Image (cartoon, coloured by chain):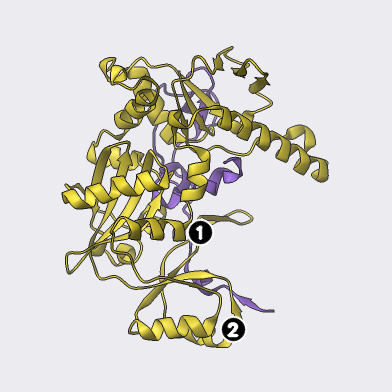
Chain colours: A yellow, B purple
Amino acid sequence: MILLVTHKNDLTADFLIRRMEERRLPVFRFNTEDFLSTFTLNIAVSSQDALFSLKNTITGTELTQDLLEGAYFRKPSLPKLIDFEHNSDLKIFAQNETAETLRSLWRMIPLHKWLNHPEALWLANNKVKQLLAAKAVGFGIPDTLISCVGDDVCKFYDQHACDAITKPVKNGFVDEADTTTLMFTAILDGEDIATLRAAPVLLPAIYQPRLHKKLELRVTVVGQQVFAAAIFSQEHDATSLDWRTWGVTNEVALRHETCQLPVDIEQKCLELNRILGLQFSCIDLVLTDSGQYIFLEANPNGQWAWIEQMLQLPIRDAIIDQLCFSQRGDKTCSSLQQ
Amino acid sequence: MTISLLYQKRIVRCEEEQAPSYHYDERKQINIVSDSEGGLPAADDPIVLGTSSKSRQRPSDDDPDAYGGALY
């Protein structure tokens, strides 16, 4: 049985489960927001054994260590703790206890069964770690400054011909009262430079010279398989600086095409995953006007379903094979394919 | 100490949900489309990716912390 750790609204998990059903593979979907309501967990450790039992109280399905073939850490949510809603202090305590209990489950599952192990995800998500790893495997990377000092950012800007971008050190959604917003890569302009010179301290941000792009690549790596999609971000003003805005505003029809990477670039993607301890990642590259492949970032738990839907790349099957392969050491799982 | 948030003006507002509402089926372990009131399932075939920023599940949603990465 494959464990899928996620939340209820994860539609990519639906997409994956449908394929598992087609391949007649059992899956246990653990929507972590429902831990302590729909799902219960026992962990028993003794000098003889280390056992766990994860149960879905609605379906009666039980997952134990003996049944577990592979585990996919998708997008878990914090458990809802309805009983503690009126006591904020106690709720924090309860949240910490439930989160730590779930971490205990993750750590009972052997490293080789995960795609990806939560600890590896956490470590690999740091952008500086990624840049260092990319540099180590021989990727070209942009000169990068992370700073909270305006004067130093201005010097960096001047050194790069006054043509630079800024982006968040991390990234993600900013949830406000009734709206959700996102921060994207932005070009530094004159107004920004004035702000930089005037502000004593800035919130830290990443600064890089602007790359002159021919196109961008989204490279999905699953085990030893590499799926590359060319994204023609330069065909639209709205996506030329950061094509991910396409995922939010839907202003343009962004052209995607399957592409074959040069062998050395493909090997660098595989090697990057290896040194980051990942079985899966979505790597963002730029192909410059001068024909260089430049590493931007790796997304250790990146989205991939839209690539499969647009380009019919068999990413789901690769993920399922990897989850089964981690247990059996062979391709038995694939033989069940209809 | 004043801290400046340089890229604040580049925040992009996410679109409202335009996709059908979903009904999570615990036994099937997938979301299925609900009827117009969001009640009983209207169709048995799950819509995989929606049109809002989150249900679309595109790279803007790469951040593993978006759903509670504290669970690492």
Q: Mark 2 highlights which residue? A: A199
**In 3D space, how far apart are the residues under numbered discs 2 and 1 (Cα atoms)?**
22 Å
A149 or A28, nearer to the observer: A149
Residue occupying image coordinates x 55% and y 13%: A61
Residue B59 image offset from top left, x and y in percent: 39, 50
Q: Is residue A338 above or below residue A32?
A: above
Residue occupying image coordinates x 30% and y 31%: A318
- Chain letter of mark 2 equals A
Relative to A305, A36 lies left or right: right
Q: How many marks?
A: 2
Residue A47 image offset from top left, x and y in percent: 66, 18
Looking at the image, the residue that sits furthest to the front is: A47
> Could you tell me the amino acid type at mark 1?
Lys
What is the secondary structure assignment of the residue under circle 2? Answer: loop
Residue occupying image coordinates x 38% and y 52%: A298
Q: Is residue A326 visible?
A: yes
| Quarter of the image where one finds residue A157 | bottom left
Label number found at residue A170: 1
